[in-house]
C-alpha cells in the first residue's frame, strides 16, 4: 500500500471514529432527555381520604421503587373544626417510573396503642442497611388543635415491616415535624418544630440524641422544616403558611435567611395553589425537586372559614401533593417555572 493510500485510510478511520463518538454522545443525550417525564398536576391525590399532606420521599432498595410517606388527613370526613387533621394514619404511595406518577399502597403499620390515634409528618432515612422513620404521635382524635405530641422512632428492613424503637428523648417536649440530614463527619442532625421555631439535635447512631436549648431558626414563626445540601450549600426551607421561607448555611449551624420565599404564589397548573406547604426535597446530582402539598380550594393557605355546623367545608379541607424543580441562581434558591410542565427523573439508587 502506498503512503498516500495509508494516509487516506487513516483520515477515513479518524473521521469514522469521530462520527461514531458523535452518534454515541447524541444517543446518550437523547437517553438522558428521554428519562425525564412530565409530572401530572396534581402529582398525587389520596384516593381514600383526599387529604395527602407533609410528603416524605425515599428510594426503596428492596423493590427498586420510590416511596412517598405522608400525613393521610381525613379530608372527606365531615367533622367538627380541624378533627379531619387528627386520627390520621401515615399514607404510602409508590412510583415505578422514577417519580413521574404515583399509586396508593395503603398505610404504614405503626400503630402503637389501642384505639384511634394520630400520626403526623414522617421523615424516613436509610442508614447501614436499615430504614428509620421519625414520626409525630398524638393519642386519640381531637376536634380542635391541641394534644401532647411525642416523636417516635421506628426501624424497618423494607419500608413495610416497622418496629418501634421508642420515643426520641429531647430537651424540648411537644415537638413535631422532624427532618434529618447526615453531616460530612457521619453525624446525623435532626431539626424539629417546638413553639413555632426550629431546634436541632445530633446523633451518631439515630438512637441516642444530644439536643440543644437554643433554637436554630427563630426569625419568623414556621413549621415543617426540610434540610438538604444542593450545589455546595446547605439549605433549610420552612413552611410559613404563605409559601416557604429559605435559609442557607455553610455548616448547618449558622443560618442566613434569603429575601425571597419559594412557592408563595399560585401557578397555572391544576390544583397548584394558593401556595406550597410542608414538603420534602430530593437532590440528584445538580438537580433537585421539592415535593409539597397545597389546599387548592383556598384563596390563602390558612383561610378556611367554618360553616354553620362548625365544619370546614370539604373544598377547603382537601389537599394534594405537587412537585416543582429547584435551582440556585446567583446564590438564591429558586423554583423553576411552575406554569409549565414539570420534568422529573429520580434515578434508581
Image (tube, rainbow, N blue to C red):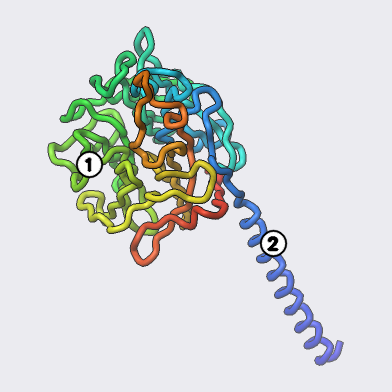
Give the camera-side residue of 107 and 348. 107
Marks 2, 1: nearer the viewer: 1
Residue 6 lies left or right of residue 140; in this view the side is: right
Image quadrant assignment for residue 205: top left
Is any part of residue 52 visible from this angle? no
Badge 2 element = helix
Q: Residue furthest right?
A: 1
Q: How far from the left and from the top, in percent, is residue 278?
A: 37, 39
Badge 1 element = loop
Is any part of residue 30 visible from this angle? yes
Give the camera-side residue of 275 and 306. 306
Q: How far from the left and from the top, in percent, is residue 160?
A: 49, 23
Q: Residue furthest top?
A: 114
The residue beneath circle 2 is 27
Q: Residue at x 39, y 54 (%)?
A: 230
Q: How far from the left and from the top, in percent, is residue 232?
A: 36, 58
Q: Residue at x 36, y 32 (%)?
A: 304
Pick the quarter of the image with the N terminus. bottom right
In the figure, 309 relative to 291: above or below?
above
On residue 221, the disc is 1
Q: How far from the left and from the top, in percent, is residue 166?
A: 29, 20
Q: Residue at x 60, y 49 (%)?
A: 38
**N-term-proximal mark, 2 vs 1:** 2
Q: Residue furthest front?
A: 308
Image quadrant assignment for residue 198: top left
Give the camera-side residue of 204 and 121. 121
**Image label count:** 2
Amino acid at each position: 500500500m502506498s503512503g498516500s493510500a495509508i494516509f487516506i485510510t487513516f483520515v477515513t478511520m479518524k473521521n469514522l471514529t469521530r462520527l461514531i463518538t458523535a452518534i454515541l454522545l447524541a444517543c446518550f443525550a437523547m437517553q438522558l432527555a428521554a428519562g425525564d417525564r412530565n409530572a401530572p398536576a396534581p402529582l398525587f391525590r389520596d384516593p381514600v381520604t383526599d387529604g395527602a399532606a407533609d410528603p416524605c420521599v425515599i428510594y426503596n432498595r428492596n423493590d427498586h421503587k420510590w416511596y412517598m410517606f405522608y400525613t393521610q388527613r381525613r379530608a372527606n370526613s365531615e367533622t367538627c373544626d380541624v378533627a379531619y387533621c387528627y386520627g390520621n394514619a401515615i399514607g404510602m404511595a409508590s412510583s415505578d417510573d422514577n417519580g413521574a406518577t404515583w399509586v396508593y399502597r395503603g398505610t404504614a403499620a405503626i400503630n402503637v396503642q389501642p384505639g384511634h390515634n394520630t400520626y403526623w409528618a414522617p421523615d424516613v432515612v436509610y442508614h447501614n442497611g436499615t430504614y428509620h422513620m421519625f414520626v409525630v404521635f398524638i393519642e386519640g382524635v381531637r376536634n380542635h388543635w391541641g394534644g401532647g405530641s411525642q416523636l417516635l422512632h421506628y426501624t424497618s428492613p423494607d419500608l413495610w415491616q416497622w418496629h418501634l424503637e421508642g420515643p426520641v428523648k429531647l430537651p424540648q417536649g411537644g415537638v413535631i415535624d422532624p427532618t434529618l440530614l447526615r453531616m460530612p463527619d457521619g453525624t446525623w442532625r435532626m431539626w424539629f418544630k417546638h413553639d413555632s421555631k426550629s431546634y436541632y439535635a445530633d446523633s451518631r447512631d439515630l438512637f441516642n440524641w444530644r439536643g440543644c436549648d437554643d433554637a436554630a431558626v427563630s426569625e419568623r414563626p414556621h413549621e415543617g422544616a426540610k434540610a438538604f445540601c444542593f450545589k455546595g450549600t446547605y439549605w433549610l426551607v420552612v413552611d410559613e403558611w404563605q409559601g416557604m421561607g429559605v435559609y442557607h448555611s455553610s455548616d448547618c449551624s449558622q443560618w442566613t435567611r434569603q429575601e425571597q420565599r419559594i412557592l408563595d404564589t399560585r401557578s397555572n397548573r391544576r390544583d397548584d395553589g394558593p401556595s406550597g406547604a410542608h414538603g420534602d426535597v430530593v437532590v440528584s446530582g445538580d438537580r433537585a425537586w421539592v415535593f409539597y402539598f397545597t389546599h387548592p380550594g383556598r384563596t390563602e393557605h390558612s383561610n378556611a372559614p367554618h360553616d354553620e355546623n362548625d365544619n370546614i367545608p370539604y373544598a377547603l379541607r382537601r389537599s394534594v401533593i405537587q412537585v416543582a424543580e429547584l435551582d440556585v441562581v446567583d446564590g438564591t434558591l429558586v423554583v423553576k417555572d411552575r406554569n409549565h410542565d414539570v420534568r422529573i427523573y429520580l434515578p434508581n439508587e
